[in-house]
Amino acid sequence: MIKIFIITERRADYSRFKPILDLIVKDKDLDYSLVVTGAHIKEEMGHTIDEIINDGFNIDYKIKMFTEEIDSSGSMVRSFSRVVHDVTYCLEEIKPDIILSGFDIGANLAVTIAGAHMNIPVAHIQGGEVTGTIDESIRHAMSKFSHYHFAANKDAVDRLIKMGEHPNHVFDVGCPSIDAIKQVKDNPEILKKYNLTHKDFFILIQHPVTTESKKTSSQILTTLNALKKADVNVLIILPNNDTGFSDIIREVKSSNFTYIETLSISDYINLLKRSIGLIGNSSSGIHETATFNIPTINIGTRQNKRLRPDNVIDVDHNETEILDAIKKCVHNKDKKQDFANPYGDGDSASKIIKIIKEIDLSDKIIQKTITY
């Protein structure tokens, strides 16, 4: 039996891990150990560990990542260091055959670094993508510490190989978030739950950009001002807790817009596909909205240069640009458009599971060398 180690910090990585965990549970040749940390165990960020428990997954450990109340780049680094420290004890006790790490999130970077130093094979999901900001540096660092790579498209595959990763260790599997959204059951009653019946509405998710933390307050105010001028209904989902998050939360809470701390995967997808479109800088706007043939108004640099489908409207932190994009989406809301999604068609998790069962997990692959 192959034991797979997974750590999840927030709703963004859990939604991608869930389809994989679902398949592991059903496979007699696989087992998993799950560590929950970060925003999942913070009451003020929705306490989304409850969703993991409700989904039926066993949690082996909880790591208290965020112990400081201050919102600063220093506290963000110290939070990361706590996971690096504590996760080593989890790995020593569990002794997994492979670590499945993901994306560009701090706790996943922590376990990737720990695994590489502890001679445990690491497979990284969604390496090779260009995003701009600190997220890109984290993502590429994870790739260099990892032994196998589950990339979301050929563009990412080619980039990983250019980075010196062995071509035989890089696999094009798509993005597991597409699996997650296709598995969600349709809920026609969802609009009643959030008092959105008979309303056209947008969803806004705007996260802080750590490399632009001094501009966070003005950036969210620009977006909120554009929404006020557009006079549209919007449901705001509060941001992740990267440096600058408190500025966004403060401005959102002092506005007159409806906001919510977090949403379950099911509620989010059911609301998203019934919305006019997604506004902000979430990767969901790049990866997922095309599957529902709705537009994304992508603001600023957080998703800079990421491979995007044709439904993405890129704008700067500029009130006029955002307002014009909103008007365009409202004008076209009844026009049917079909968009191809370059991040896969919903079978990523099954591809990942199949590959894990076939790859070499012996000591032979631990010693990495660049290929050029």
Image: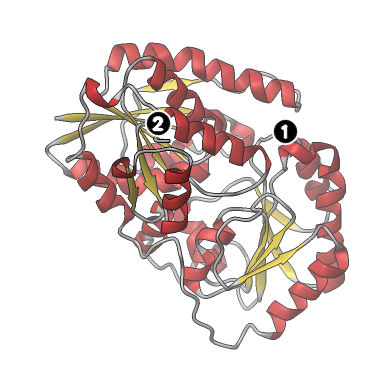
Q: Quadrant of residue 17?
A: top left
In this orientation, does residue 47 appear? Answer: no
Please state the horizontal and vertical placement of residue 170, each as a whole percent of the image.
34, 45
Q: Position of residue 172 (x, y in %)?
A: 35, 53
Residue 181 drawn at (x, y percent): 42, 60
Q: Is residue 28 above or below residue 329?
A: above
**SS of the residue under disc 1:** loop
Residue 8 located left or right of residue 29: right
The figure's colour scheme reads: secondary structure
Q: Earlier in the sequence, mark 1 or mark 2?
A: 2
Mark 1, residue position: 243
How many residues crowd mark 1 within 10 Å: few (<14), some (14–19), many (20+)? many
Label annotation for residue 146: 2
Residue 143 shows in this picture: yes
Name the amino acid, label 2. Answer: Ser
What is the quadrant of the N terminus in the image?
Answer: top left
333 relative to 103 in the view: left or right: right
In the rendered image, residue 40, in percent from the top left (x then y), is placed at 52, 34
At label 1, the amino acid type is: Thr
Characterize the local packing of mark 2: few (<14), some (14-19) or many (20 or more) Cα atoms within 10 angstroms. many
- Judge left or right: residue 252 versus residue 137: right
Q: Residue at x 47, y 14 (%)?
A: 86
